[in-house]
Image (cartoon, helix red, strand yellow):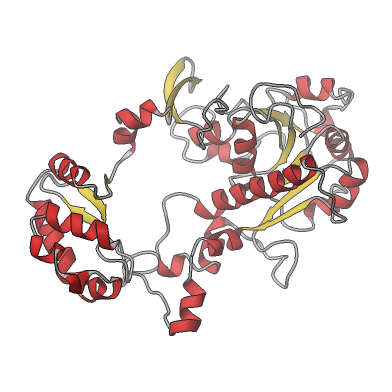
């Protein structure tokens, strides 16, 4: 796959240059790094990636950065200087993939656009993530994940119907764009590994809003075909009945998905409604949707009459998809998360002494080819000397942005 390929982790030998800040490009870089690629993360002098300060309750570096920058090497360069730009050019010559999430035109202004860097390394896969893409009338607009989720249609259908549009508590637009960036790069690399040829430059153009829009299933087709404009419906999906979050007797919640004909029958038997399970009139999605309030009401009455554990046991025994609404402590201690390596303990110096902190594991699980967390996000500039000296740019002076 790569001129650097050796053996071991699936992407060992692949070298990635990350010119990214915040979440979108760094999330893409993390996926590469988790599976063995050497990811060189360029950070600006002084502050580094601004994610280092996000949700930081104590210590010098946030756990969000430690999570997002795991397995990466931090190199400090000032891309606004000629020395920093030249260092990037030299690094590019040794890389397989470059990932960036600047506004369109910024890298070109520094002489670091695809034309310049692919002239140095024609095989370089250039992954570009931006708010609105590299083309189109809105290409020059600033775009964060929040505006992309609004523009892409997600915010309009998220939340309660009598309240303003809501958002997910995670950066969906950024992470989805990062995943599409990785997929695009790997598609090009796979094509090459199979001897495929293309006259097009190896470029991946990901717009934040397009990643969001791709998740919304038949939002626009439903509008054209049925005149349907989806609205906010809280925890329930319109036309998908019964499904949603239901309160339990101990003040917790269980999410139940009983919206296929066969599962609906099992759910009705589990809640003691054999009559509805055997009602042929409820076998269609449309019929169940017409009786949404009735069905959700009887399910809520059943869940509220028992604690969460008892409700889950009965639903699981009946083969009904159901899950508890977990918070962070519940996830961190759940035996299934632990058994699959989805919660892993690593030592982190937060203030003065190392502490055990639990971090998310690597997804996806590839049996026999698993990715691993080798180290959490590094201190700013921790690998500057190592990387620049190895790649014969150790003469870069302090104006290139090395950490003091």
Foreground residue among 305 and 108 = 305
Locate the C terminus and report the quarter of the image it occupies.
top right
Residue 19's x, y, as percent? 72, 42
Q: What residue is shown at x 50% (from left), y 53% (from top)? A: 172
Q: Is residue 335 above or below residue 115?
A: above
Q: Quadrant of residue 186?
A: top right
Residue 43's x, y, as percent? 70, 36
Residue 145's x, y, as percent? 55, 56
Q: Is residue 116 above or below residue 386?
A: below
Q: Quadrant of residue 142?
A: bottom right
Q: What residue is shown at x 52% (from left), y 62% (from top)? A: 149
Is residue 153 in sight in this rendering? yes
Q: Give the farthest residue toward the top.
A: 353
Is residue 243 in sight in this rendering? no
Residue 198's x, y, as percent? 84, 53
Q: Quadrant of residue 226?
A: bottom left
Locate the N terminus and report the quarter of the image it occupies.
top right
Q: What residue is shown at x 90% (from left), y 48% (from top)? A: 116
Instruction: Tell how many labels.
Output: 0
From the viewer's perspective, tell me whether residue 382 is left or right of residue 23: right
Q: Is residue 63 above or below residue 353?
A: below
Q: Give the farthest residue toward the bottom.
A: 227
Foreground residue among 171 and 310 = 310
Q: Is residue 34 above or below residue 142?
A: above
Foreground residue among 307 and 104 = 307
Q: What residue is shown at x 84% (from left), y 32% (from top)? A: 94
């Amino acid at each position: 796959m790569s001129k650097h390929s050796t053996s071991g982790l699936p992407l060992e030998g692949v070298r990635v240059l990350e010119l990214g800040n915040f979440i979108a490009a760094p999330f893409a870089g993390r996926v590469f790094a988790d599976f063995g690629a050497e990811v060189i993360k360029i950070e600006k002098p002084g502050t580094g990636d601004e994610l280092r300060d996000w949700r930081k309750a104590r210590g010098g570096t946030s756990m969000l950065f430690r999570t997002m920058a795991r397995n990466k090497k931090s190199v400090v360069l000032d891309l606004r200087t000629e020395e920093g730009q030249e260092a990037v050019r030299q690094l590019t010559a040794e890389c397989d993939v470059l990932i960036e999430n600047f506004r369109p035109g910024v890298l070109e202004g520094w002489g670091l656009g695809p034309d310049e860097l692919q002239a140095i390394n024609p095989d370089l896969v250039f992954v570009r993530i931006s708010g609105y893409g590299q083309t189109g009338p809105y290409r020059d607009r600033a775009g964060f994940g929040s505006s992309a989720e609004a523009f892409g249609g997600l915010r309009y259908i998220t939340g309660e119907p009598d309240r303003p549009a809501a958002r997910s508590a995670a950066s969906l637009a950024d992470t989805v764009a990062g995943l599409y960036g990785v997929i695009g790069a790997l598609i090009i690399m796979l094509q090459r590994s199979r001897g495929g040829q293309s006259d097009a430059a190896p470029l991946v153009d990901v717009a934040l809003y397009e990643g969001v829009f791709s998740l919304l299933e038949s939002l626009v087709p439903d509008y054209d075909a049925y005149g349907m404009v989806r609205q906010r419906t809280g925890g329930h999906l319109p036309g998908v009945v019964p499904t949603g979050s239901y309160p339990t007797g101990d003040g917790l919640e269980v999410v139940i998905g009983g919206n296929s004909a066969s599962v609906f029958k099992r759910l009705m038997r589990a809640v003691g409604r054999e009559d509805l399970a055997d009602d042929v009139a409820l076998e269609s999605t449309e019929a169940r949707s017409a009786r949404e309030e009735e069905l959700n009401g009887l399910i809520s009455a059943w869940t509220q009459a028992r604690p969460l554990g008892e409700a889950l046991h009965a639903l699981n025994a009946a083969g009904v998809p159901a899950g508890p609404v977990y918070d962070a402590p519940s996830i961190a201690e759940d035996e299934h998360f632990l058994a699959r390596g989805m919660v892993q303990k690593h030592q982190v110096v937060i203030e003065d002494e190392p502490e055990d902190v639990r971090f998310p594991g690597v997804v996806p699980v590839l049996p026999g080819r698993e990715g691993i967390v080798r180290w959490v996000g590094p201190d700013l500039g921790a690998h500057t000397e190592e990387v620049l000296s190895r790649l014969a740019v150790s003469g870069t002076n302090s104006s290139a942005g090395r950490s003091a």
